[in-house]
Amino acid sequence: MKYLPLVLTSLFLTACVDDRSDLELFVTTTKAQHVAKIPPLKSPPQFEHFAYQAELMRSPFIPPSRELTEEVLDKTKDCLQPDLKRRKSRLETYALDNLKMRGTLQEGEQIWALIQTNDGDVFRLGVGAYLGMYHGHISKVTPVNVEVIELIPDGSGCWSERTSNMELSGE
């Protein structure tokens, strides 16, 4: 009884040493019949040298000048369009996402919003002041938010109004 596991293991191992010629024949015929067809690789594109001359191009780290980014109005259409002759304020160079409402000041009935730029500068703005990149102007100031109406181009030469709200953030 003591040697029974040893005898069974040796019997099992001797049964595994059978003739494998049929298996080897199957593998060689399968390899011969099924040849992989791999298409040839495409030739790499021809490298073209480009001489970068920085003095002839605009730096990618400086915003483009106003002449390159000015909107074109279609005067033939009778629809809503911004006044491009108006001189833009400093806050019109910032997107609304880069501005935060930090508080309000009130004198009598007049309420001013305190708007902070992502540079850390704080400005006092009232109703009618312009801000944002889409000709936005403040239409309403409350102690907790500022309502801004922006003019968005529709692609056909006209503009449509979009209302955005800036809420007081005390971060």
Image (cartoon, rainbow, N blue to C red):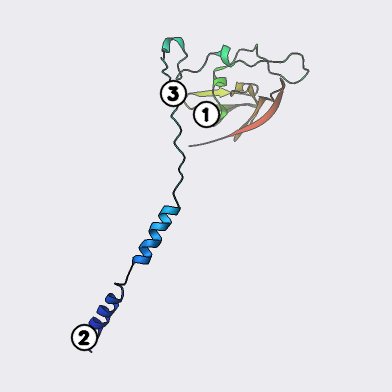
> Counting residues from the N terminus, which is met first, the one under dot 1 or under dot 2?
2
**Residue at which label 3 appears:** 46
Q: Which residue is mark 2?
A: 3
Residue 5, given in percent of the width and then of the height, sits at: 25, 83
Q: What's the amino acid at mark 3?
A: Gln
The kind of residue on which mark 2 rests is Tyr
Q: Residue sitting at 43 percent across and 29 percent down?
A: 44
Q: Residues within 10 Å of mark 3 (few under 14, many from 20)?
A: few
Seen as rendered, the residue at the extreme right is 78
Query: On the rendered structure, is 37 left or right of 4?
Result: right
In-image side of 23 versus 114 (left or right): left
How many numbered marks, from 0 up? Answer: 3
Outermost residue, left direction? 2
Dividing the picture into quadrants, the one containing residue 106 is top right
Q: Which mark is residue 98?
A: 1
Relative image position of residue 37 (x, y in whole percent): 46, 45
